[in-house]
Image: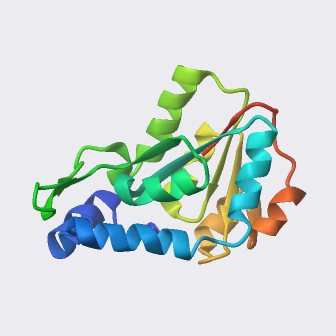
């Protein structure tokens, strides 16, 4: 996430080593829920009430993120497929999925923009692969509340370290997409 190693190399290596089974994926999905960044549910609820369409765009795995998205009432998740055999053992991942490589997040955003024609797109991210999306969005907000990455902080249009700071940022448009 610091941008030092191409994402495509990270995925292959990581999955060869980990080979997560369904039970492990379920544990990690629960950890996402148990360790949610304070203020995120409130920010998402407020944005939805204002007409924004939140989207989770991640290099993480869809079945793990889906539970978090459901808890936040976020319908749209763009994340890497993870496959299991009938017995729950690891069967692979979506190797060709855009977010498994550098430049994949901007690609997904371009596709979304063509499909839904949002008034504005705002990206909140903490990694270099998120920052790659800056040219495709109307506002890139860097988030340093878990880990502050210098390239993201320096490249962001706005920088926050707590979700409570989100309200101090002027968002473009009104009914738009938040990735």
| Residue 50 x %, y % | 82, 39
| Residue 152 x %, y % | 62, 65
Is the residue 9 above or below the residue 57 in the image?
below
Which of these two is toward me, 141 or 174?
A: 174
Residue at the image position 41 percent from the left and 67 percent from the top: 29
Which quadrant would residue 117 be assigned to in this image?
top right
Q: Is residue 4 visible?
A: no
Tally the numbered discs.
0
Which of these two is toward me, 54 or 24?
A: 24
Which quadrant would residue 78 be assigned to in this image?
top left
Q: Is residue 164 visible?
A: yes
Q: Is residue 173 left or right of residue 114?
A: right
Residue at the image position 44 percent from the left and 53 percent from the top: 66
Q: Is residue 77 left or right of residue 150?
A: left
| Residue 19 x %, y % | 17, 69
Residue at the image position 61 percent from the left and 77 percent from the top: 146
Which quadrant would residue 119 be assigned to in this image?
top right
Residue at the image position 53 percent from the left and 22 percent from the top: 114
Is the residue 66 above or below the residue 111 in the image?
below
| Residue 143 x %, y % | 67, 66
Q: Is residue 110 left or right of residue 26?
A: right
**Figure colour scheme:** rainbow
């Amino acid at each position: 996430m610091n941008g030092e190693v191409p994402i495509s190399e990270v995925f292959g290596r990581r999955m060869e080593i980990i080979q997560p089974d369904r039970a492990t994926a379920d544990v990690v999905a629960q950890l996402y829920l148990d360790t949610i960044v304070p203020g995120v549910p409130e920010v998402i609820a407020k944005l939805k009430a204002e007409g924004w369409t939140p989207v989770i765009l991640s290099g993480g795995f869809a079945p793990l993120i889906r539970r978090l998205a459901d808890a936040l009432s976020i319908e749209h998740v763009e994340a890497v497929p993870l496959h299991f055999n009938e017995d729950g053992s690891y069967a692979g991942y979506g190797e060709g999925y855009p977010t498994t490589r550098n430049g994949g997040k901007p690609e997904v955003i371009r596709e979304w923009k063509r499909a839904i024609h949002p008034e504005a797109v705002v990206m909140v991210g903490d990694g270099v692969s998120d920052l790659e999306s800056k040219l495709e969005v109307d506002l890139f907000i860097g988030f340093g509340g878990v880990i502050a990455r210098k390239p993201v902080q320096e490249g962001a249009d706005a920088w926050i370290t707590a979700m409570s700071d989100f309200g101090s940022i002027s968002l473009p448009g009104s009914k738009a997409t938040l990735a």
